[in-house]
């Protein structure tokens, strides 16, 4: 009898479960409520950067190979455009330059002599023309012989041909002078290449040479910062890159600290995302993360060493 009661109780539970399932299936499932999307909207964005001149740091190189004979500057010196930074051995180039200069002087002397000779012949030709015209008039009047007339005519015509010859010689000498002058300019350029000059105003950052060093075109011998505004070239992670725009206020700080080193504004925000470049050699850097290049132009009074690593803090909600 006890077993009969248990079976009856189990059957009742089964019927109750079936009833509940049937009731649930007769109603439509309630739609899931949408969860509002989370918006990441920080007041400040931080990225890593490095202090550089806006025109970037350039490598100092020579157009030609040579031995350093004179160094006129030191690291840290401010230089002006075309200022001579150093000089290379130039004895051969100087000898060629002197030789070409002598050729130019000699050719000019030859032209002067040819012009003087042509002027003298022109004077003789003018006198011969008068003699010819007088003899021609007298010959028509039968006052001189035909032989005298022919002699005067021959003399005049001969001098005319001499003028043509001398004029042609002057033209040829002038053409040769132009060629010699071109050779002189080439020698002058080769000689000037032995003096390494600053391409623009700026500051010498480093020099890796000493007197007697061999300089080669493919090997830089120092670095140079062109005179331009001081900027922090920063990289902003792709997650926050879209929130950065030109004109936003920013400040720089030493990584890990809170004190501001300098202040400025965002003056450039790159149009594309790209791989990390400034600090891609860091251990543990995620190469699959992309960044946006951002320039922060510092206030004029800012004084930070080139190459200083900084954190760039950009106030994305303040302009």
Image (tube, helix red, strand yellow):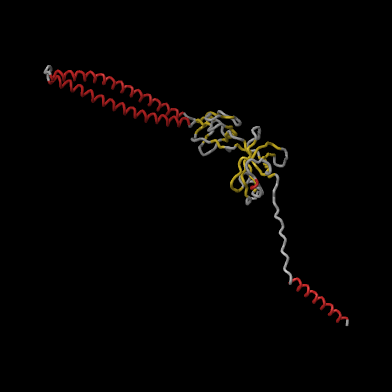
> Image check: 134 left or right of 293?
left
> Image check: 4 left or right of 67?
right
Tell me if residue 230 can be seen. yes
Q: Position of residue 300 (x, y in %)?
A: 64, 33
Tell me if residue 311 can be seen. no
Between 104 and 220, the residue placed more toward the observer is 104
Task: Determine the residue positioned at 27% across, 19% down.
Answer: 120
Residue placed furthest toward the top:
143
Q: Position of residue 302 (x, y in %)?
A: 66, 34
Quadrant, the N terminus: bottom right
Between 24 and 304, the residue placed more toward the observer is 24
Between 116 and 3, the residue placed more toward the observer is 3
Q: Position of residue 125 (x, y in %)?
A: 24, 20
Residue placed furthest toward the right:
1
Task: Determine the residue positioned at 20% across, 22% down.
Answer: 156
Between 216 and 291, the residue placed more toward the observer is 291
Q: Position of residue 150 (x, y in %)?
A: 15, 22
Quadrant, the C terminus: top right
Residue placed furthest toward the front:
27
Q: Quadrant of residue 256?
A: top right
The count of marks equals 0
Note whether 26 is above or below 84 in the view shown: below
Q: Quadrant of residue 80?
A: top right
Q: Quadrant of residue 174?
A: top left
Task: Determine the residue positioned at 26% across, 21% down.
Answer: 122
> Image check: 33 left or right of 137?
right
> Image check: 21 left or right of 252?
right
């Amino acid at each position: 009898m006890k077993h009969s009661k248990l079976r009856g109780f189990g059957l009742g539970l089964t019927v109750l479960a079936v009833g509940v399932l049937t009731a649930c299936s007769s109603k439509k499932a309630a739609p899931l409520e949408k969860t509002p999307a989370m918006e990441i909207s920080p007041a400040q964005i931080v990225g890593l950067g490095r202090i550089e001149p806006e025109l970037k740091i350039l490598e100092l190189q020579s157009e030609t190979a040579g031995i350093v004979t004179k160094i006129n500057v030191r690291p840290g010196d401010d230089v002006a455009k075309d200022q001579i930074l150093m000089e290379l051995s130039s004895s051969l180039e100087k000898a060629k330059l002197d030789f070409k200069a002598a050729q130019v002087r000699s050719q000019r002397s030859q032209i002067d002599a040819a012009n003087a000779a042509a002027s003298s012949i022109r004077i003789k030709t003018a006198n011969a023309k008068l003699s010819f015209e007088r003899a021609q008039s007298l010959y028509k009047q039968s006052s001189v012989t035909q032989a005298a007339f022919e002699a005067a005519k021959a003399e005049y015509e001969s001098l005319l041909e001499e003028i043509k010859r001398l004029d042609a010689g002057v033209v040829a000498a002038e053409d040769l002078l132009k060629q010699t002058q071109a050779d002189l300019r080439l020698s002058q350029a080769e000689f000037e290449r032995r003096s390494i000059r600053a391409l623009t105003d700026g500051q010498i950052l480093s020099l890796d040479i000493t007197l007697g060093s061999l300089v080669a075109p493919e090997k830089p011998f120092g670095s140079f910062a062109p005179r331009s505004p001081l900027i922090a070239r920063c990289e902003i992670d792709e997650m926050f890159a879209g929130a950065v725009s030109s004109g936003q206020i920013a400040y720089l700080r030493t990584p890990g600290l809170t004190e501001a080193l300098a202040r400025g504004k965002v003056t450039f925000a790159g149009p594309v995302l790209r791989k990390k470049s400034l600090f891609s050699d860091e251990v543990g850097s995620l190469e699959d993360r992309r960044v946006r290049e951002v320039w922060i132009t510092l206030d004029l009074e800012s004084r930070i060493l080139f190459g200083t690593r900084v954190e760039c803090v950009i106030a994305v909600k303040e302009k």
